[in-house]
C-alpha cells in the first residue's frame, strides 16, 4: 500500500511511501465488558540470539485503518486491530513503527536482515496486562515470514 502520515521516514524525501503492514488482531473474549482505551506498544526487541536492541519509541502504536487513532475500545466478544510493524518496500530490510511519536525523520527499528523477536504489551482499562511476542524473519523480501511465539 502507499502509506503516508505526519512524519518523513529516514531515507525518504516525502511523507508518502510504499509499505507493507503487519497487523495484530486482539480478541476480547469476555462477553460482559468492553476493553476500553486499549493501547498497544512495542516493549522489547531482540535478535533471535537474544541480543537486546534499543527501542527509542515505546509510544502507542496506530489502530489499523483509522487516521490519528492510537487507542480503541474492543467490544465484548469482538476484536480490534493494530499496526505492529511496517516494512519499507523501497528497502525491505528496514522495519518501522507507526506510532503516536511525531519525531521526523522516523528511524527504523530494524535495518538489517535477520530473525527478530518483538515483544508487545497491551493495556486496557479493567483488564490485566497482556504480552505477546512475534518472530519476524527480515530476509530482504517484500513478504518476510513471521509467526507468534508461544
Image (spheres, rainbow, N blue to C red):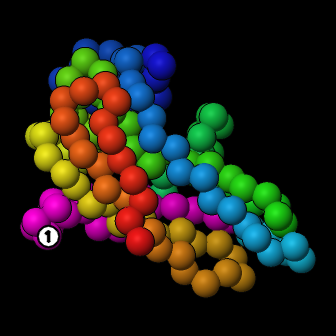
Tell me the residue that label 1 is attached to: 50
Where in the figure is residue 54, as x and y percent of width and height? Answer: 17, 62
Q: Position of residue 50 (x, y in %)?
A: 14, 70
At 48% from the left edge and 19% from the top edge, which residue is drawn? 1
Displayed quadrant of residue 52: bottom left
User: Relative to 30, is 37 above or below?
Assistant: above
- Circle 1 residues within 10 Å: few <14, some 14–19, many ≥20: few
Judge left or right: residue 38 versus residue 138. right
Quick one: 107 or 49, which is closer to the camera?
A: 49
Question: Quadrant location of residue 10?
Answer: top left
Q: Residue at x 59, y 40 (%)?
A: 64
Inspect this view and state whether residue 6 appears: no
Front-most of residues 148 and 31? 148
Q: Residue 39 vs residue 5: left or right? A: right
Q: Magenta span covers which residues?
A: 37-59
Which percent across, then down, holds residue 138? 22, 40
Q: Is residue 1 above or below residue 81?
A: above
- Identify the residue at image location x=64%, y=64%: 38
Amino acid at each position: 500500500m502507499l502509506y503516508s502520515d505526519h512524519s518523513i521516514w529516514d531515507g525518504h524525501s516525502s511523507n508518502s511511501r510504499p509499505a507493507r503492514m503487519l497487523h495484530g488482531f486482539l480478541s476480547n473474549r469476555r462477553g460482559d465488558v468492553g476493553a476500553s482505551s486499549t493501547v498497544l506498544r512495542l516493549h522489547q526487541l531482540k535478535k533471535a540470539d537474544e541480543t537486546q536492541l534499543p527501542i527509542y519509541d515505546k509510544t502507542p502504536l496506530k489502530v489499523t485503518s483509522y487516521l490519528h487513532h492510537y487507542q480503541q475500545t474492543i467490544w465484548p466478544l469482538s476484536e480490534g486491530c493494530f499496526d505492529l510493524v511496517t516494512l519499507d518496500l523501497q528497502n525491505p530490510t528496514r522495519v518501522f513503527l507507526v506510532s503516536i511519536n511525531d519525531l521526523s525523520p522516523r528511524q527504523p527499528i530494524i535495518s538489517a536482515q535477520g530473525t527478530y523477536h518483538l515483544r508487545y504489551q497491551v493495556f486496557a482499562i479493567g483488564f490485566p496486562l497482556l504480552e505477546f511476542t512475534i518472530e519476524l524473519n527480515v530476509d530482504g523480501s517484500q513478504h518476510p515470514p513471521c509467526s507468534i511465539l508461544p
